[in-house]
Amino acid sequence: MAITSEGLEKKLREELECTHVELVDESGGCGAKFSALIVSNKFEGKPLLQRHRMVNACLAEELKSIHAFSMKTLTPAKWEEQQGKS
């Protein structure tokens, strides 16, 4: 089964209760390279490494088939702050 940005987003939203997810398939449709912006209340008070581990655990099965996955993990407050600056 092919990995899609829609499938990844659905899983992240359900398991990490994300309030905002942006996934970009940078592999030209083959599902091998993704970049992600993930916003979740579950990241509150957690250091960056722990946030990334949470995402990696959530997508453990999918990451076996993905060659490159870059992520930016933010709390809703930090996301709002960044939106105000842009």
Image (cartoon, helix red, strand yellow):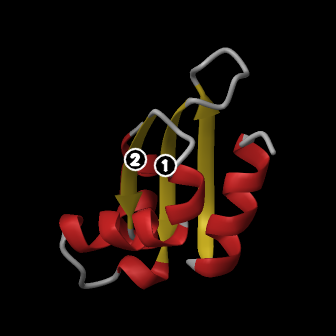
Q: Is 48 located above or below residue 83 in the figure?
A: below
User: Which amino acid type is marked by label 2?
Assistant: Met
Query: What x and y, as percent, mark residue 18?
Result: 59, 71
Q: Secondary structure at mark 2?
A: strand
In which quadrant is the N terminus drawn?
Answer: top right
Residue under label 1: 37
Viewer-nearest of labels 1 and 2? 2
Q: CA distance from mark 1 to mark 2?
A: 6 Å
Viewer-closest of 84 and 73:
73
**Marks 1 and 2: CB-CB under 8 Å?**
yes
Q: Nearer the viewer, residue 54 or 61?
A: 61
Amino acid type at mark 1:
Leu
Residue 46 rendering spot, x and y as whole percentages:
24, 80
Residue indicated by mark 2 = 71
Horizontal relation, residue 46 to residue 15: left or right: left
Between discs 1 and 2, the one toward the N terminus: 1
Q: Nearer the viewer, residue 4 or 84?
A: 4
**Secondary element type, mark 1:** strand
